[in-house]
Every structure is written in C-alpha cells, then in structure tokens.
Image (tube, rainbow, N blue to C red):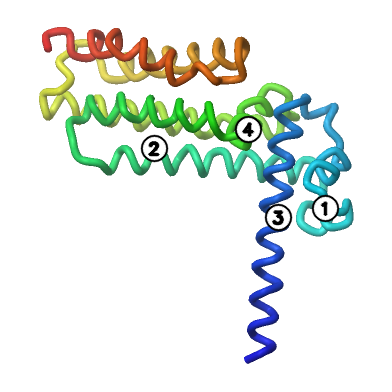
Amino acid sequence: MNRVGEVRRKQQRGIRTRMALLEAAGRVFSRMEYDKAKLKDISDDAGISLGSLYFHFGNKDDVAAAVLDAQQERMTEVLSSVVETEGSSLGRLLDLLDGVAELISADALVQAGIRLVGSLPDELKDRGYGFYEEWQRVAETLIREGLEDGSVTSTAPAPELAEVVHETFIGAQVLSGMMDGWQTLPARIERARPRLEALLAPEA
C-alpha cells in the first residue's frame, strides 16, 4: 500500500513538474521567437533543472509540440463547451467567438502557441494550424444548423459564411496581438458581433 502511494506521489509530482515546464515554455515563447529560445531559458523560468526538462522533453521541438498540443486542447475545450450549450446555432457561434477571444487574451500558454506558429520549423507548422481548421469546420456546421433552426437567414453558401466569420476573427486576433498582446481581442470581437449578426441573419 505504501509502495502504491509512493508511486502515485511520484506520478503527481511528475505531472506538476511537466506542467510547470510547459507554463514556463509558454512564457518564454511569448517573449522570443522559437529559434532564439533555449531550453535553459525555459528551465530557468520554471526554476527547474535542465536535467529534469530533458527527462520530460527530449529536445526543443518536443517542448514546442507539447505547447501546441496544450494550446489546442484548451481552445478545443472552449469550443466543445460552447457548442454543447442550449440556444440557437447563431447564438452559439457568436458565443464561441467570445469564448475563444477571452481565452486568448488571458492564457499565456495559448498565446505562446499562437506566437510559435510563425517561427516553427516546417515539420511542426501543420500541427500549429490544426485548431483553426477545426474551428472553421465547427463554424460551418453551426451555420448549417442555423439555417435549419432559422437563426441564420443569409442566402450565401455556408462555407463562404464560415470563411468570412473565420477571417473576421483572425484579423482581430492578428491586430490585437500586434497592438497589445491580445488584451483588446475580446472588445474587438464584441464590436464585430453586430456586423456578423447582420451578415448571418440580415432579415432578423
């Protein structure tokens, strides 16, 4: 029983250490581009030995991949939680925009994943774009459902509407990232909401 308890304690300690290293990697990658960041920067930021970092992650590519996975997991959690709520499909789509904007503005690990994509080696770039492809698919699905439940009344094709919604969000994300580190992203999306409603439900 004591041996089992000790194993569990070690596992929990390992999970905490790995998460601390991931959060530190997020902060480091938020400050500098991928090719300039060093593993020692991450271990120093976490206050954890370089040897421990190598135990959890073999190299910098492994750290970057883990940051991207964590970013996409957190964004997908928001996506899933909003999609599963009650309400019209149009309302859920707009709430999804708000939820992802709030997450990006507040979560350093998510911000690091976004910054990483532009400076990653080619073999990791596809991994970094995965969420955005998923988000556009979900947006299109919600628009199709909105056409069925009457909350979306536009006569434009659903794929085109989803693309415009996606482009609106990405444009706001890029501008807010350049101007203030995404702090104003929620406000930018809030300002865009009436225009998106007019696009998707012009007769409402």
Amino acid type, callout 1? Ile
Q: Nearer the viewer's eye, disc 4 or disc 3?
A: 3
Q: Residue at x 65, y 41 (%)?
A: 67
Question: Which comes sooner in the sequence, label 4 or label 2?
Answer: 2
Tags 4 and 2 touching, CB below 8 Å: no
Per the model, the C-alpha gap separating discs 1 and 2 is 33 Å
Residue 45 horizontal/vertical position (percent): 80, 41
What label sits on residue 79 in the rendered view?
Answer: 2
Residue sitting at x 69%, y 88%:
3
Marks 1, 3: nearer the viewer: 1
Q: Residue at x 66, y 30 (%)?
A: 125
N-terminal of the two: label 4 or label 3?
A: 3
The answer to whether 33 is drawn above or below residue 46 in the figure is above
Determine the secondary structure under disc 1: loop
Quadrant in which the C terminus is drawn = top left
For the residues labelled 1 and 3, the Cα–Cα distance comes to 10 Å
Q: Which three-letter amino acid code belongs to the residue tagged 3? A: Arg
> Which corner quadrant of the image does residue 163 belong to?
top left
SS assignment at label 2:
helix
Q: Quadrant of the N terminus?
A: bottom right
Residue 16 place in picture, x, y as percent:
67, 59
- Between marks 4 and 3, how big is the CA–CA gap? 17 Å
Q: Which residue in the protein does label 1 denote?
A: 48
The residue that disc 3 covers is 18
Q: Secondary structure at mark 3?
A: helix
Quadrant for residue 30, please give it.
Answer: top right
Q: CA distance from mark 4 to mark 2?
A: 17 Å
Which disc is residue 113 wearing?
A: 4
Q: Residues within 10 Å of mark 4 (few under 14, many from 20)?
A: many
Circle nearer the viewer, 3 or 2:
3
